Each structure stands twice: as C-alpha cells, then as structure tokens.
Amino acid sequence: MAAIVPYFHPTTVGFVDDHHHFLESLSLLAPQTLCSETFYSSEDALDWVNLPHPRQPLAHGCFSYDQGLVRFDLSVLEREITLPDRFRRISVVVVDYAMPTMNGLDFCAEVSDPDIRKILLTGVADEKLAVAAFNQGLIHRYVPKASLKDISEIYTHVADMQIRYFQQYGERITTSLMTDKNQFLWIYDVRPYFEQLYDEFDVVEFYLQAKPRGYLMVDRYGIATRLVVLSPAEMKTEIEDCFALGPPGAICAELVRGNKLPFLMEDPRNYLGHESYPWDEVLYPVNRVGQWCVAVIPNPPTDIDFDPAISSYNTYLAQKI
C-alpha cells in the first residue's frame, strides 16, 4: 500500500466476461476483503456501472465556495467513515475484449464516469487494438490473457488501479496542502513506517488528518488507529500546552523526557469523573522517524458518530452475502 494518497477506502470492482468458467474461477481466487460484482452480460454490467452514486466523490466535498472564495476543509475526510455507502463506489472495471454482443472497447466507451479505471483483458489478436485504446485514454491498462501464469494475477492489477483511482482525487487535495510544504511532504518521509502499520493493524481504509498531522487508519472491523506525525517544534508546543493543564509531577517528568506525546480530546480541568483524570491513559510513546516525532494511538477518541456495527467494511461485506 502506497501512503501517498490523502485517503483510501475499499471500493467495488466489476468483472465482465461472457465465459462463465473464467469468472467462477476468478471469484474463487478473490481476496477476502475485495467487494466485487461479476457479469456475464455486457449490457447488464453497463446498466450497473452507469448507476450514479448518490454522493459526489469525497475529495470534492473538501472544497466549498463562500463569497467568491474557495475554502478547503480537510476534516471532511474522516467523516466519510460514518457513511456505509462509501464502499458502493465503483473504482475499477475489468472487461474482456471478445464478447458476443458488445466488445470490451465498446463497453469502456459507454462507461459514463470518466474516473473509473478500466482494465481490458485481451487475446493475442486484440493487443494492437488495446495499445491504441490505451494511447487514446479509453482504457487505463490492458492485460493479455496469455501472459497470465495464474488468473489471480489480475487482482494485482486491480489493486494498483484502485490506488490510481484515489490518486486522481488526491491531486486536488495535495495541491492545496502544498502551500505549506510541511502539510504533505512529510508523508514521503514516514511512508515506510506507515506501510508497516498498515500491515500490522490490517488497515483497509485511511484518511489524512490535519490537527494534529497524520492519518486515521481503520481496519475491516471498524477498529481505528491514529498515526500522529509532528515536527520537533510542534512536539515541544504540544508538551508546553499540556503543562498548562496542570498534570501531576510524575506526568510532567514523563513529558520533560520528550518520549511521550499527550493526546487529549477534552480539557482535564473539565473532567467530571469520580476519580482523578487518567493522565497515564493519554500519553503515548514517541518514535523518531527521520526528523519527525511519530506516535501511534490505538482506539483514538473522536468527535464523529462512528458505529462499526453499521459502518465498518466487515458489516458491509456481511450484508452483501
């Protein structure tokens, strides 16, 4: 997984081929977390793929217009996890070229959403047509069936196209963030660390965060993890702000050492619990990744109304069965 897109979540992939055995074999080899639809009829597939999604792409929602000014709000991203229909969005279609009533290129030409990534499966005789279609931008990749050692290799192409699907939306966001180079270029520095966490926590979706900088990462069951990335100066400011809240002496000593990051969602001075404020539970170990101070926060507190029983990817997949 490449951590250079502002957000990513599972999407739906369509497979179109009139060979029943091929599609059945492909379905048996599908990754467990892939949501897909298969079609033997190109006409049925086209009706499905051209159904409009009820909401605009998420990246578009980060921008609004107010009295002639364009306003950019990155906080819109994390609210996406409350919307179960995010997984219905179609990102990729894989289409066989040789079909009886409509060939794969004609099918791709009829797909109304220009952002959907299109993969064409070809025979040896079709490759020249596929190259021409790729050069014209009608398709985004072609895969000669004869070149596949195992048909499950198709899923590698699908995964790559899903990332590219989100990259096209991410460009608008990253361009906006580039006005402050620290707001996005840090991702390249921490990318290997991000990818390690992605595998460790079985992440299936993630969303860029601005305050504090980092990512909200979510697994298929809706369990969230927060990656926080701060510069040394920002780390110092966070600690100084925490001192102002009057933590106990032992907590102050921890903070002075600079190896713990405070992550508070409420002012301890307003804490209404019967016991003392749980300071030990809001300090997290800090790792140094290059010039950055990085902390991982399991089950982070949040002010959005997210219910995994309703909005997690696992719940969505279970409802599809």
Image (cartoon, rainbow, N blue to C red):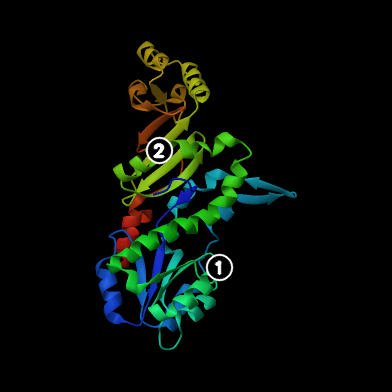
> Residue under circle 1?
114
Residue 267 lies, in percent from the top left, at 47, 26
* Looking at the image, residue 228 lies above or below residue 108: above
Residue 127 lies, in percent from the top left, at 44, 76
Residue 271 lies, in percent from the top left, at 42, 25
Residue 122 visible in rendering: yes
> Residue under circle 2?
226
Q: Nearer the viewer, residue 250 or 89?
A: 89
Crowding at mark 1 (Cα within 10 Å: few <14, some 14-19, many 20+): few
Mark 1 is on which residue type?
Answer: Pro
* Looking at the image, residue 311 lies above or below residue 21: above
Residue 70 vs residue 290: left or right? right
Identified at 34% across, 63% down, the residue is: 155
Image quadrant in which the C terminus is located: bottom left
Identified at 40% across, 64% down, the residue is: 12
Crowding at mark 2 (Cα within 10 Å: few <14, some 14-19, many 20+): many
Q: Nearer the viewer, residue 213 or 271?
A: 213
